[in-house]
């Protein structure tokens, strides 16, 4: 029996290293199109640039958190015009479980006077896999990341974690510099991604639907708010504007408005602003640069009227 157990353990040990080696070589050799269950290093959303940029920034007036509506929606250049120093820590499809990790890592060093948390109801319904892959591919891997991967229990997350760990051990990304321009996107210092100006043309009214949410995402979101409030961090919740057609297609917007309003000061810009779909958006839920500037100026006005600055 003892010999059998030893053989099983040796087999598992060999299998672990063999599988890890195969995952790493697959990711290293083959293109992203062939690595369907593996998120490769770097591309998409400029999170790598944002993380590196954060090391050069401290004592900001405003820290922005949230999904692509955040890093494509809050432009530090606009706020700088009004004497407000800001940093954008948004990321693609960022859900509360990733926001929690980012805050633990960067809140103290950025030391913001105010946190503006962009709250798109959809992020509470996402499983968190897309944002987890983005974080694994572009930030350091430590125990919270490993715990996140175990909690999500998804094969692509596991594979990407293995690939990322091996890359870290071999120090393969030491000299990596992410291009400022990627397709129609341009990284702007301070965490913002500016898209080349374009306009939403195929405006259609989507079928009626309801926002949903996952219990573990709500729990993570509420932990974030309570922790920030416990440590006397000023935080406001902001829902960035989407096209009227998209917003009106959801039948329970008021339910989520109430949920957010009960947790912190909350501003839904779908009610505050009336932005034309064809001139202020590049798709049904992302502002183009013209829309960003209108949105940001309106937010600055609210922050000043509320005596945040």
Image (cartoon, grey):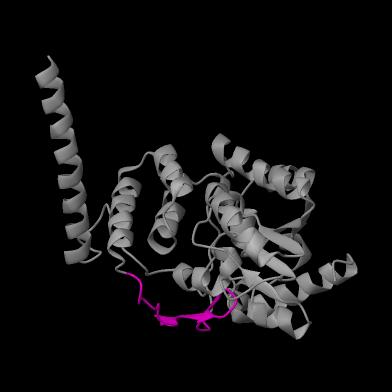
Q: Residue 136 sits in which quadrant?
A: bottom left
Mark yes or no: residue 214 visible: no
Q: Looking at this view, name the residue that lies furthest to the top.
A: 1
> Does 167 appear above or below 57?
above
Residue 256 visible, this orientation: yes
Query: How many labels sit on residues?
Result: 0
**191 falls in the magenta region:** yes
Q: Is residue 3 magenta?
A: no
Question: What is the quadrant of the C terminus in the image?
Answer: bottom right
Q: Which residues are magenta?
A: 173-198
Give percent across and percent down for residue 100. Answer: 58, 50
Q: Is residue 135 left or right of residue 172?
A: right
Q: Kindly report the secondary structure that dominates the magenta region of the rendered protein.
A: loop
Question: What residue do we see at 27% from left, 63% from top?
Answer: 170
Residue 78: image x %, image y %? 70, 81
Query: Left or right: where does residue 13 sit relative to residue 125?
Result: left
Position of 292 compared to 201: left or right?
Answer: right
Q: Percent x, y for residue 60?
A: 71, 71
Q: Nearer the viewer, residue 298 or 18?
A: 18
Where residue 71 appears, as percent x and y from the top left, is 57, 69
* Residue 1 to residue 131: above or below: above
As rendered, which of 19 and 40 lies closer to the eye? 19
Please name the residue shown 76% across and 63% down the image. 114
Which residue is at the front of the view, 199 or 48? 48
Q: Quadrant location of the N terminus?
A: top left
Residue extending farthest to the front is 2
**Residue 74 vertical position relative to residue 163 in the rendered view, above or below:** below
The answer to whether residue 308 is left or right of residue 73 is right
């Amino acid at each position: 029996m003892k010999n059998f157990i030893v053989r099983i353990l040796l087999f598992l040990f060999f299998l672990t290293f063999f599988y890890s080696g195969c995952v790493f070589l697959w990711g290293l050799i083959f293109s992203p199109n062939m690595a369907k269950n593996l998120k490769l290093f770097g591309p998409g959303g400029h999170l790598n640039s944002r993380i590196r940029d954060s090391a050069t920034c401290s004592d900001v007036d405003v820290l922005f958190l949230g999904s692509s509506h955040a890093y494509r929606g809050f432009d530090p250049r606009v706020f700088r015009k009004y004497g407000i120093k800001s940093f954008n820590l948004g990321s693609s499809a960022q859900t509360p479980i990733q926001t929690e990790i980012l805050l633990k890592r960067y809140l103290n060093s950025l030391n913001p006077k105010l946190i503006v948390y962009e709250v798109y109801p959809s992020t509470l319904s996402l499983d968190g896999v897309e944002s987890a892959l983005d974080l694994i591919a572009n930030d350091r891997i430590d125990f919270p990341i490993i715990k996140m991967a175990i909690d999500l229990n998804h094969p692509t997350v596991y594979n990407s974690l293995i690939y990322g760990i091996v890359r870290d051990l071999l120090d393969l990304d030491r000299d990596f510099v992410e291009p400022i321009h990627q397709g129609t996107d341009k990284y702007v210092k301070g965490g913002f991604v500016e898209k080349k100006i374009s306009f939403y043309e195929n405006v259609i009214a989507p079928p009626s639907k309801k926002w949903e949410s996952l219990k573990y995402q709500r729990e993570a979101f509420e932990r974030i708010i309570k922790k920030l409030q416990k440590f006397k961090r000023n935080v406001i919740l902001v829902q960035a504007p989407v096209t009227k057609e998209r917003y009106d297609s959801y039948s329970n917007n008021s339910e989520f408005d109430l949920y957010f309003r009960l947790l912190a000061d909350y501003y839904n810009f779908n009610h505050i602003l009336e932005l034309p779909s064809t001139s202020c958006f590049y798709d049904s839920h992302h502002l183009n640069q013209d829309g960003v500037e209108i949105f940001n100026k309106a937010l600055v006005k609210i922050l000043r009227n509320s005596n945040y600055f």
